[in-house]
């Protein structure tokens, strides 16, 4: 047997957890080149930050035990169908001369313990062909791996979908797909799917046991606080909580031990006093730099909810990817990757601190944020960083980084001023150790347990859904329902996802017919622009927002009637309510009001969460005549991106996507869904005479962030 076959399979993810009571993050830091954490095909220096609450809720909606048992059965079936023999033959002989056992019936091959398994460890078994050299073996196994990745990809996708109770995020799906895919990727090392079948069965058993244990632990909420419950949970699973240590001393610091009195030699009873003055406190600058980044990152996450109506959340969303990359590569051996992230982090920090000071004057966390940003700037220009940049290889050679005084900050105990400063720096490292934890995840069950444990440490407790009783983590102060979908009843636990038709409401078809008559009249009068407008408005009402508004429980009958009435007002009769030629009105509902949908809205979201919306807006922005512009697009296939688009266009696109896919979780219908997450100022003037862009409404609903402006705003004014 090849030596590599005796190695244990390890998933290979290094996961970091940033602890915050309001916005905890999970940082996936790839340890294996074949793991692509961001899902964008790039594994070099790869790292990504995900919302821990969102990931946990997604995984709680998946029957993990059933999922992994099904994947295990697929691996077992693959092995039973002689695939193990195929792999071993790929290592033993050319593909043109298959082992005779391959021609046996599939019925016999389906027996897992059949006698004719090819055992490469059997010294009495003589191969039918000359053994291949290692290079040929590697080529054969690589080809087999590529074929199998294509074979298993749809199986993994179908299994995850069937065991998920409702739509799950692209991030959660990526995790589940990756843990299955890594088994196939590893067949070059352990070419036996029976091994991975057992590994998946173990994940199934452990995830089920973790769920049972977690439910039991949270019942102690009347006896223990959340941190104590986290400690109890971790004690059963032997989870560590802190991996960041402080190198505090350099020299002997033991206190003087008692000396026995010598009655026979009294002169020896006067021991010489031991001085500790030579002892120094030491702080490694690399550790301090990393700690400053961690603490600064956590403070940005903590302040973001307080700055939700400002530019700060958008700044963080656009630049957050630099933090996990920098924290991951702060090891001196990865200095160049680390150094590449610093300019972007400092630029972001200056903008975020400015917003925090402007909107939160006197806030203690905002003041600390500025202090820590100044610390990052100071470290960025410190001598040890200059030494790295000047000659990285020389700095690393023969461990000079630890011998050179530039790489340490130290203070003698008799130097009180420097000692106070150094202990303050060590306090930053100590805080970072409490805020950030990283470990290598060897299995999905270990990651799942860690996610649940970290949320308890952050003081975030799950609650039971009032519909199905399942556990979920609340995402708002009034959360009562999880996002599960019941395939049997075809209903979501959350009532607002279940649009019921109001039979007593007037159909939008009547208004659409009026639009058709107005179109004909406009053509007869030679008002071509008006005719085109009424055609579009009829489609807007009949095929766009009309049916969605009619069927929505959150819209009152009175508001719905008001909307229909306002939509029906414009006509093409001269001098009487003739629509403005420059900007025809498209009325929409916006949290209790009817507003003109010609306002611009800036919408931002991660493309992985809403891929169809991402594609629709991208295509719309490419049109030279459309009222949609792309403001920002991050890296990757479906990155976090930002657009400016007319409000009525955005709402139409959302409705069309929701109508086309009844199984997937609907995109929040802005103006109706999630009013508790939206801030609106109805007093903002709605006129074309508005000199500058005024914010009318802003909020974030399920990772969809938006800011609605007055009619006086247009993307061309930014230029």
Image (spheres, helix red, strand yellow):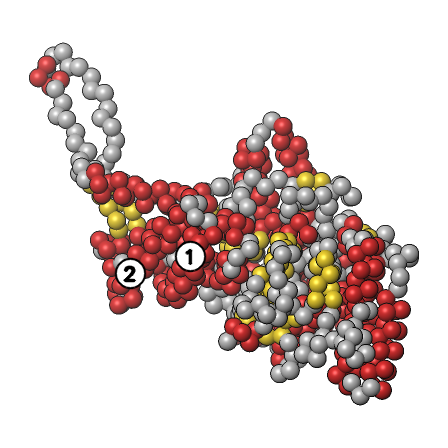
Q: Position of residue 21 (x, y in %)?
A: 53, 43
Q: Residue at x 37, y 45 (%)?
A: 428
Q: Nearer the viewer, residue 483 or 388?
A: 483
Density class for disc 2 (Cα within 10 Å; few <14, some 14-19, many ≥20) is: few
Residue 166 image-quadrant placement: bottom right
Measured as percent of width and height from the top left, residue 605 is found at: 61, 63
The picture quadrant where one finds residue 619 is bottom right
Q: Position of residue 75 (x, y in %)?
A: 70, 60
Residue tagged 2: 381
Q: Which mark is residue 233?
A: none
17 with respect to 347 (left or right) = right
Up-down relation of residue 313 to residue 82 (above or below): above
In this picture, residue 598 sits left or right of residue 392: right
Closer to viewer: mark 2 or mark 1: 1
Instruction: Work out whether residue 158 can be spotted.
Output: no
User: Does the image show residue 624?
Assistant: yes
Q: Is 551 rendered above or below residue 421?
A: below
**Residue indicated by mark 1:** 354
In the image: residue 680, left or right of residue 255? right
The secondary element bearing badge 1 is classed as helix
- Residue at mark 2 to residue at mark 1: CA–CA distance: 21 Å
């Amino acid at each position: 047997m090849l030596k590599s076959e005796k190695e244990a399979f390890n998933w290979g993810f290094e996961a970091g957890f940033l602890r915050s009571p309001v916005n905890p993050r999970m940082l996936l830091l790839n340890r294996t080149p074949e793991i692509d954490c961001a899902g964008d095909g790039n594994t070099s220096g790869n790292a990504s930050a995900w919302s821990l609450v969102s990931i946990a809720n997604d995984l709680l909606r998946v029957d993990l035990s059933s999922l992994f048992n099904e994947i295990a059965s697929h691996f077992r079936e693959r092995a039973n169908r002689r695939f193990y023999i195929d792999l071993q033959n790929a290592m033993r002989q050319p593909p043109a001369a298959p082992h005779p056992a391959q021609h046996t019936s599939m019925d016999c091959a389906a027996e897992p313990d059949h006698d004719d398994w090819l055992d490469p460890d059997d010294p009495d078994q003589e191969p039918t062909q000359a053994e291949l050299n290692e290079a040929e073996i590697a080529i054969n196994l690589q080809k087999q791996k590529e074929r199998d990745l294509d074979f298993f990809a749809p199986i993994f996708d179908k299994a995850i979908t069937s065991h998920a109770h409702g739509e799950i995020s692209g991030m959660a799906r990526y995790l589940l797909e990756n843990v299955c895919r890594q088994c196939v990727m590893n067949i070059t090392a352990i070419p036996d799917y029976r091994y991975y079948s057992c590994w998946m069965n173990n994940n199934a058993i452990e995830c089920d046991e973790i769920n049972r244990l977690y439910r039991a632990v949270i019942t102690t909420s009347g006896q223990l606080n959340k941190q104590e419950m986290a400690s109890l949970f971790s004690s059963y699973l032997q989870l560590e909580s802190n991996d960041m240590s402080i190198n505090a001393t350099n020299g002997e610091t033991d206190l003087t031990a008692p000396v026995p009195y010598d009655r026979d030699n009294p002169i020896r009873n006067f021991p010489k006093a031991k001085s500790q003055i030579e002892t120094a406190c030491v702080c490694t600058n690399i550790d301090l730099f990393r700690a400053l980044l961690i603490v600064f990152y956590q403070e940005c996450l903590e302040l973001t909810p307080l700055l939700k109506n400002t530019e700060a959340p958008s700044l963080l969303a656009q630049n957050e990817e630099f933090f996990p990359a920098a924290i991951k590569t702060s090891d001196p051996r990865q200095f160049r990757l680390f150094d590449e992230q610093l300019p972007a982090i400092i630029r972001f920090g200056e903008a975020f601190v400015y917003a925090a000071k402007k909107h939160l004057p006197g806030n203690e966390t905002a003041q600390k944020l500025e202090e820590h940003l100044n610390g990052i700037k100071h470290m960025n220009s410190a001598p040890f960083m200059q030494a790295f940049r000047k000659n990285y290889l020389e700095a690393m050679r023969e461990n000079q980084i630890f011998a050179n005084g530039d790489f340490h900050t130290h203070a003698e105990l008799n130097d009180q001023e420097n000692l106070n400063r150094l202990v303050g720096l060590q306090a930053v490292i100590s805080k970072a150790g409490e805020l950030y934890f990283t470990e290598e995840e060897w299995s999905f069950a270990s990651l799942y347990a860690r996610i649940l444990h970290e949320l308890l440490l952050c003081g975030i407790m799950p609650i039971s859904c009032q519909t199905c009783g399942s556990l979920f983590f609340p995402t708002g102060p009034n959360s009562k329902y999880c996002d599960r979908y019941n395939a049997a009843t075809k209903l979501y636990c959350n009532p607002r996802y279940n649009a019921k038709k109001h039979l007593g409401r007037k159909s939008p078809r009547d208004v659409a017919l009026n639009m058709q008559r107005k179109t004909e009249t406009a053509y007869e009068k030679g008002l071509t622009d008006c005719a085109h407008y009424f055609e579009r408005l009829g489609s807007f009402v009949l095929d766009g927002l009309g049916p969605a508004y009619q069927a929505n429980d959150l819209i009152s009958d009175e508001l719905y009637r008001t909307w229909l009435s306002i939509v029906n007002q414009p006509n093409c009769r001269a001098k009487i309510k003739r629509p403005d030629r420059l900007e025809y009105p498209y009325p929409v509902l916006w949290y209790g009001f009817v507003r003109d949908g010609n306002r611009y809205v800036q919408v931002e979201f991660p493309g992985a969460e809403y891929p169809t919306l991402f594609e629709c807006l991208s295509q719309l922005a490419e049109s030279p005549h459309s009222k949609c512009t792309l403001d920002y697009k991050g890296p990757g296939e479906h990155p976090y991106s930002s657009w400016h688009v007319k409000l009525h266009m955005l709402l139409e696109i959302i409705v069309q996507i929701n109508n086309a896919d009844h199984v997937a979780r609907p995109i929040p219908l802005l103006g109706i869904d999630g009013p508790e997450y939206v801030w609106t100022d109805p007093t903002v003037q709605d006129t074309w005479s508005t000199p500058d862009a005024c914010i009318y409404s802003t909020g974030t609903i399920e990772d969809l962030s938006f800011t609605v402006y007055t009619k006086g705003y247009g993307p061309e004014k930014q230029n």
